[in-house]
Image (cartoon, grey):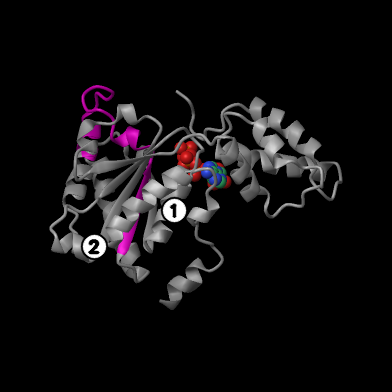
């Protein structure tokens, strides 16, 4: 209703057009989402509904963006969480949080007048690591079990249809139970961008920046092998800061060149502490 409109005014939704260099991943994701949109036929034909999509790939490649764009594409309320939020010292707390997450998704959708909700779980490997191997603590099992119980309970004719999208860069660590049919049984790879992909991402992140005539995005893309989307976003930002510091009105190629080194030196842009 009106309240929701006011509340979300100004915060622009992420769409697939905001994601560069991932056309194959986007196509695969869209195919899965189109299938979900077709819920009347799914019900009529008795097809098992798609409940979970797993996005795999290195940090900073746009997995969170993809999940947000997927919510926009399916007109779903977006609820975000991270695997690390569910790990607790006290037995049962993690499981309780999983229950609350699903409850929150239903409530958010109803409040926004939407039939769909998309729950995004980043770093799913923390909550869904292989049982009994990577974890010794009982708590992990209860939390993971609760997630499986919630997923198994999702029905195509629920008042609010819930889709789970999870992200990981350690798909090998996931408990096989999570990957079984009816759980996260669709996997979309979100890899580092190639040169063309890097050009696309650089275009996106310089679209609101004044570029000097000498800037050659394809040259920058050539020099940034191995950069993720997050690296490239950071590069565009650093170049703009450098231009400002020098009192330039436009960002020139030199600002980019110098910033490439800086972003490289900065090392991993991974937000998580590396263990
Ligand atoms: P992590 O695994 O570390 O959570 P992620 O894969 O979820 O990373 P995002 O959080 O989606 O990555 O990306 C971080 C930021 O980097 C985005 O907000 C965006 O500015 C930029 N970015 C990353 N990938 C892309 C891309 N493919 N196109 C455009 N921008 C991107």
Is the residue marked by circle 1 packed among few (<14), some (14-19), or many (20+) residues within 10 Å?
A: many
**In this view of the protein, can residue 104 be seen by the observer?**
no
Residue identified by numbered label 2: 39
Picture coordinates of residue 38, whole percent (x, y) = 27, 62
Give the CA distance from mark 2 to mark 1: 21 Å
Q: Is residue 113 above or below residue 103?
A: below
- Which stretch is magenta? 116-144
Residue identified by numbered label 1: 68
At 44% from the left and 71% from the top, the residue drawn is 4
At 71% from the left and 35% from the top, the residue drawn is 219
| Disc on the earlier residue, 2 or 1 | 2
Q: Is residue 44 above or below residue 184?
A: below
Q: Quadrant of the N terminus?
A: bottom left
At 30% from the left and 36% from the top, the residue drawn is 127
Q: Is mark 2 within 8 Å of ligand 1?
A: no
Is the residue marked by circle 2 packed among few (<14), some (14-19), or many (20+) residues within 10 Å?
A: some
**Magenta region includes residue 132:** yes
Q: Is mark 1 within 8 Å of ligand 1?
A: yes
At 53% from the left and 36% from the top, the residue drawn is 193
């Amino acid at each position: 209703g009106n309240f929701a409109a006011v509340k979300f005014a100004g915060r622009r939704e992420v769409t697939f057009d905001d994601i560069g260099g991932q056309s194959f991943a986007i196509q695969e994701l869209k195919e899965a989402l189109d299938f979900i949109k077709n819920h009347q036929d799914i019900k009529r034909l008795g097809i098992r509904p798609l409940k979970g999509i797993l996005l795999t790939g290195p940090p900073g490649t746009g997995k969170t963006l993809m999940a947000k764009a997927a919510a926009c594409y399916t007109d779903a309320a977006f609820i975000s969480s991270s695997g690390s939020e569910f790990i607790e010292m006290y037995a049962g707390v993690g499981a309780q949080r999983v229950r609350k997450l699903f409850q929150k998704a239903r409530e958010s959708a109803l409040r926004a007048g939407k039939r769909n909700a998309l729950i995004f779980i980043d770093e799913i490997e923390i909550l869904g690591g292989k049982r009994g191997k990577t974890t010794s603590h009982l708590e992990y099992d209860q939390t993971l079990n609760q997630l499986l119980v919630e997923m198994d309970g999702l029905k195509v004719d629920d008042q609010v249809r819930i889709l789970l999208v999870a992200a990981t860069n350690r798909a090998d660590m996931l408990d096989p139970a999570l990957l079984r049919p009816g759980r996260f049984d669709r996997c979309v790879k979100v890899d580092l961008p190639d040169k063309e992909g890097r050009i696309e991402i650089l275009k996106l992140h310089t679209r609101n920046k004044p570029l000097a005539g000498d800037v050659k995005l394809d040259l920058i893309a050539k020099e940034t092998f191995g950069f993720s989307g997050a690296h490239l976003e950071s590069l565009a930002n650093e170049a703009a800061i450098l231009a400002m510091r020098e009192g330039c009105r436009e960002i020139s190629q030199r600002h980019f060149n110098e910033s490439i080194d800086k972003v490289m030196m900065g090392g991993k842009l991974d937000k998580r502490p590396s263990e």
